[in-house]
Amino acid sequence: MNINAKPLQKPANPNFSSGPCSKRPGYDVSHLDISTLGRSHRSTIGKKALAKACQQSKEMLGLPEGYRVGVVPASDTGAMEMALWSLLGERGVDVLAWESFGKGWITDILGQLKLNNVRTFEADYGQLPDLSQANFNNDIVFTWNGTTSGVKVPDGDWIADDRTGLTICDATSAVFAMELPWEKLDVVTFSWQKVLGGEGAHGMLILSPRAVERLESYVPPWPLPKIFRMTKNGKLIEGIFKGATINTPSMLCVADYLDALDWVEGLGGVSGSIKKSQDNLAVIENFVSKTDWIDFLAESADTRSNTSICLKLKAAPEQVKAIVSLLADEGVAFDIGAYRDAPAGLRIWGGATVESSDIEALLPWLEWAYTQVTSE
Ligand SMILES: Cc1ncc(COP(=O)(O)O)c(C=O)c1O
């Protein structure tokens, strides 16, 4: 066999980034309903589109009665910051973190909010902290899927049903790709550019009735900028969850989000997009099981992410970089290097906008690039 021979077929779509993620197959910007553009977002059609974004998300995700969904500024970070700054401080906080973004929430809670009744449970890349340590009389802050380590919580069984604190979950790389136990989650945030391949800019904030109760009964001791404020005179501003956004959103991004939701409906709804993502992971699992120089960063199979699939290689960090560059230069795979704070490796997005056939086509190229770089 000629080890220099390139595989014959390239992925039809080489976009495997973990955010913004690939547009869906068949995406065409000219198909968006742009009738709202150039109009006020508070016009009848503007508000209708925004209300639809909230309502359709709620229905498709199967949220329990009384849960609210709102479009908020500044992507997932904006939604999480709104929640942390509006809700925390009423009681103790347990923060669970195992990669860059989760650790970022610790920085916020300790360094910026300066809360002192805080317990942190951290684990290194590849692992989860001991979830059984969480005290559900405290508020719990965690990410469902650690996008930069490819480690997710296996399920919600560790979350107490009779909790008195709130669970605040950054689920940006999980919503629409993983089963979420909504009844166990009081605040959930996500952004459009991940699993749905939508556009960055706006965040989705999901609140349980208990989260709303907290908002209406607790006023944090620090000032809250207008962009974070969800109550007025001690009452929830319900409009935020019915399409009356706090400030001006991009109606083009909204049109794009609605288009993505319709596409998920066409897959059979959330179960369809979850299955596509799981099938993508299965393709990589099969490859890893037959290849001795590659392994998952996630140490345990039940914590393996099916969206941000993180892999470690038997290679030096500079060799990994060379593999990533080679694949990009060949037009085979873009943006598959590990996140900047994570151990050197690969991160291949397996959300539903990525086709299994493209991952299948990528893998022989990965083998080729590995051979080229490590036999130099
Ligand atoms: C777990 C997690 N939290 C937060 C963020 C930040 O998201 P955004 O850029 O949408 O604010 C990301 C982005 O990748 C993420 O993966």
Image (cartoon, helix red, strand yellow):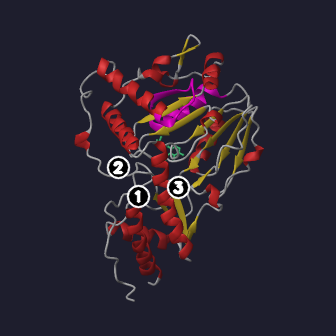
Determine the secondary structure under disc 1: loop
Discs 3/1, front:
3
Q: Is residue 113 left or right of residue 192?
A: right
Q: Which mark is residue 23?
A: 2
Q: Amino acid at mark 2?
A: Lys
Highlighted range, magenta: 60-88
Depth check: give the residue in front, 331 or 353: 353
Residue depicted at 29% across the width and 50% down the height: 26
Where is 224 relative to 74, above or below?
above
Q: Is residue 298 visible?
A: yes
Depth check: give the residue in front, 337 or 4: 4
Q: Which mark is residue 306?
A: 3
Q: Is residue 233 left or right of residue 357?
A: right
Q: Earlier in the sequence, mark 3 or mark 1?
A: 1
Residue depicted at 49% across the width and 49% down the height: 274
Q: Is mark 2 within 8 Å of ligand 1?
A: no
Q: Amino acid at mark 3?
A: Asn
